[in-house]
């Protein structure tokens, strides 16, 4: 089975729950993983940006990966996020982290450096040559400061065997359609924007790696499933209900919004690591007010 088939549907970029003292809360991580899998997600992504990965130590990353595999227990595929703006260090992480059971590596494009398109190509080529694992590109220019052009994505897809997909979060619908038009047939393209997932699936994407699926796995997985079956009437109805939720998730920062929702649902405690802080009181009140509308 190709990666495109294995990772069709709803993936969830897992948050990292913390205790009040700032340590990783593995009890809540297990509860979260059960919650999202029971809610219908098709796969999980650990150590993505939503997991506050820049604030995690190497030892914490290893333990989170190992515990995630243990808690998932083979129920769904697991993708591991490994990216950065130092190509050699990314390769070292790929070699040192326990990713043997991972379905693929999700690798965010280099942030801050603002490499050229050739630099992005060479970065991913070097990463891909260091492993036999499938690599999923992650284009999120709003966070990284640079965009992987459609032509670069297609070039990587055609020229490097184990570059197998992209999480596309540019928000540029024309760019998304260009990738979908020009990519190899088995190349996986998924949305990285919850609020655009419905439209992007209509254009041909195979699903989404979602933030919202942490807190509303059932509703969001159903939306994606309907859209993938071309049942856009049902998908639109769910999307309309979730519209305000999308706004609240990203009103201040990610993952402050989704952690507030998950805390209100009793899944985790509402703690983040600096420089991120919990939602302001006013936005948190809106989160509380929104939750009953989903019932």
Image (tube, rainbow, N blue to C red):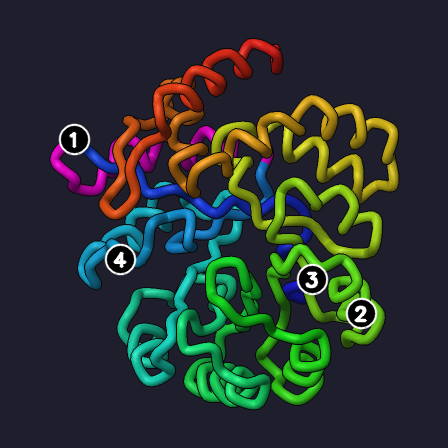
What is the spatial separation of the Cα atoms under label 3 and label 2, in whole angstroms?
A: 11 Å
Residue under the image location 54 percent in, 85 percent down: 116
Tell me the crowding category of disc 2: few under 14, some 14 to 19, or many 20 or more residues within 10 angstroms, Cα based: some
Q: Which residue is mark 1?
A: 20
C-beta proximity under 8 Å, tags 4 and 3? no
**Is 25 located above or below residue 62 in the figure?**
above
- The quadrant in which residue 170 appears is bottom right
Q: Mark 4 or mark 1, which has the lower sequence index?
A: 1
**Is 214 located above or below residue 90 in the figure?**
above
- Identify the secondary structure beneath mark 4: helix
- The quadrant in which residue 62 appears is bottom left
Mark 1 or mark 3, whichever is nearer to me = 1
Q: Mark 3 or mark 2, which has the lower sequence index?
A: 2
Q: Which residue is mark 4?
A: 61
- Identify the secondary structure beneath mark 2: helix
Residue 141 picture location, percent across and down: 55, 64
Q: Which residue is mark 3?
A: 189
Residue under the image location 65 percent in, 35 percent down: 221
- Identify the secondary structure beneath mark 1: loop
| Mark linked to residue 178 | 2
- The quadrant in which residue 247 appears is top right
**Is 286 located above or below residue 174 in the figure?**
above
User: Which stretch did the figure color magenta?
Assistant: 20-40
Q: Mark 4 or mark 2, which has the lower sequence index?
A: 4
C-beta proximity under 8 Å, tags 3 and 2? no
Let me know if residue 21 is in the magenta part.
yes
Mark 3 or mark 2, whichever is nearer to me = 2
What is the spatial separation of the Cα atoms under label 4 and label 2, in whole angstroms?
A: 35 Å
């Amino acid at each position: 089975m190709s990666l495109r088939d294995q990772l069709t549907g709803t993936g969830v970029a897992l948050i990292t729950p913390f205790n009040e003292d700032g340590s990783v809360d593995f009890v809540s991580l297990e509860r979260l993983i059960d919650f999202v899998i029971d809610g219908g997600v098709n796969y999980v992504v650990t150590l993505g940006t939503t997991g506050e990965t820049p604030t995690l130590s190497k030892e914490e990353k290893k333990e989170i990966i190992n515990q995630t595999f243990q808690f998932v227990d083979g129920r769904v595929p697991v993708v591991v996020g490994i990216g950065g703006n130092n190509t050699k260090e990314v390769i070292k992480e790929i070699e040192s982290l326990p990713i043997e059971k991972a379905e693929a590596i999700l690798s965010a494009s280099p942030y801050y450096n603002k490499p050229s398109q050739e630099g992005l190509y060479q970065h991913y080529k070097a990463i891909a040559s260091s492993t036999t694992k499938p690599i999923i590109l992650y284009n999120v220019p709003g966070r990284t400061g640079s965009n992987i052009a459609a032509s670069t994505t297609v070039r990587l897809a055609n020229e490097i065997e184990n570059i197998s997909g992209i999480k596309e979060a540019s928000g540029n619908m024309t760019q998304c359609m260009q990738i979908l038009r020009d990519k190899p047939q088995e190349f996986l393209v998924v949305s990285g924007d919850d609020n655009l997932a419905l439209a992007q699936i209509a254009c041909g994407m195979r699903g989404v790696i979602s933030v919202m699926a942490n807190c509303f796995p059932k509703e969001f997985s159903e939306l994606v499933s309907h859209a993938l079956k071309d049942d856009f009437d049902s998908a639109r109805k769910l999307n309309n209900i979730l519209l305000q939720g999308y706004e609240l998730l990203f009103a201040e920062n990610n993952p402050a919004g989704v952690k507030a929702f998950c805390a209100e649902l009793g899944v985790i405690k509402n703690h983040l690591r600096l420089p991120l802080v919990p939602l302001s009181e006013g936005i948190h009140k809106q989160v509380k007010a929104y939750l009953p509308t989903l019932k």
